[in-house]
Amino acid sequence: MDEGAGSAELLRRMAAVTDVALSRLGVPEMLDELLIRARTLLGTDTAVILLLDPHARQLVATAAKGLEAEVRQGVRIPVGEGFAGRVAASRRPVVVADVTPANVINPILLETGVRSLLGVPIFAAGEVVGVLHVGSFTPRRFTADDISLLQLIADRAGVAGHIRSAKAEQQAALSLQRSLLPPQLPDLPGLSMSARYLPGHEFGVGGDWYDVFCLPSGWTGLVIGDVSGHGLASAVVMGRVRSALRAYALVSEDPAQVLTMLDRKVRHFEAGSLTTALYAMISPDRGTVRLSSAGHLPPVLAVPDRNTVLMDVPVNAPLGVGHPPRRCTTDVALPPGSLLLGYTDGLVERRDQVIDVGLKALVNVVHADDPHSVCSVVMSEIAQEPATDDIAVVAVRRSAAAGESTSP
């Protein structure tokens, strides 16, 4: 084949990989079609995609043509071992001219009689997410053009796999959040309440959360917290922290003690997670709030006929940072008609200004009013558009009974 004909053939093969029609296929269908085209364009007998399980550090056979047994048997190859493992570890193409037990650990490759292999890494967002390899039942010398073409196919598969992974994580994260954030706040005598949650990133879920619950003693627990990070991983940690706090709230009626126990849990079981939380307890007569803060911003207190203020609550160390000093609980009067507002830092933090500016703006818009109205005003006037961080807000107001004084 002369040079002109060779260039034309290479362009034809590349066009088959970059065909826009592939974009109209679903992810499984696209991967299947890419394997068919890889075998046809490279003239091989087998084509396999193995995707990385990042937790186990193993490559898992996901799709195959000519080696379907790899998928049926759930073949797993440790990164760094065997042919595919070397491709993933080196992040470079690997060619095996003569397949032997010394250079291949997957028995299926040996049993089916594959003689020569070419494998390339599959990348997504700069990280290796899998391996694509093709094989021949007869000895084969793979050329530089073969390697370039297979890498082009792998890049196309990487985009499809990344989309599938992102969609799967998004659905899992959204389902998890729906199960963790209260679908509706409890209807409790003497209190009215409202809450908002606004995601600040593509997955639509993160580590911010709020919770309100009634304890057997008649006290009402109110929590607002923030697990660092975004996406499914943070949502999972948030769910475990939320459940643990509820359990500890049944053990102790001292918010500081509850957060102390929660801190031990986070340090031992959620190592590496930074979590802030504000835990408040409202007394059965609604006249007192007991609070403790683990690195969380102070709540806002609005009392009728008075200036709205940030509550003077000591801010102890966040959860999971080590061995903090003794945590403390603060008791604050909650006069009739008063409103307590908790929030996460995404509401008031801005990269281009000190946080005091956002806190002052928040205090200026909060009044001792209907919690639904307060949350609406806060989200419309204070929340950044578009949100760059998750935002959670919860407002609780004590009823103003007829004839009651608003003085503490």
Image: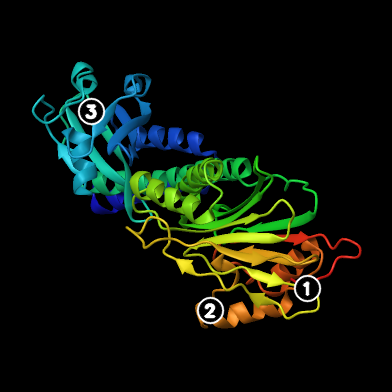
Q: Looking at the image, is mark 3 or mark 1 nearer the viewer?
A: 1
Whole-Å distance between the Cαs marked 3 and 1?
86 Å
Q: Looking at the image, is mark 1 or mark 2 nearer the viewer?
A: 1
Does 401 appear above or below 236? below
299 lies left or right of 102: right
Q: Which residue is mark 1?
A: 407
The residue carrying pointer 3 sits among few (fewer than 14), some (14 to 19) or many (20 or more) residues within 10 Å by Cα, namely: many
Q: Amino acid at mark 2?
A: Ile
Q: Amino acid at mark 1?
A: Ser
Q: Is label 3 in contact with label 2 (beta carbons under 8 Å)?
A: no
The residue carrying pointer 2 sits among few (fewer than 14), some (14 to 19) or many (20 or more) residues within 10 Å by Cα, namely: few
Q: Which residue is mark 2?
A: 355
Q: Nearest the camera: 366 or 340?
A: 340
Q: Is residue 277 visible?
A: yes
4 lies left or right of 187: left
The location of residue 78, given as percent across then percent down, is 23, 34
- Label 2 residue SS: helix
Q: Which residue is mark 3?
A: 136
364 lies left or right of 124: right
| Identity of the residue drawn at 56% across and 43% down | 246
- Label 1 residue SS: loop
- Label 3 residue SS: strand
Q: Nearest the camera: 325 or 36?
A: 325
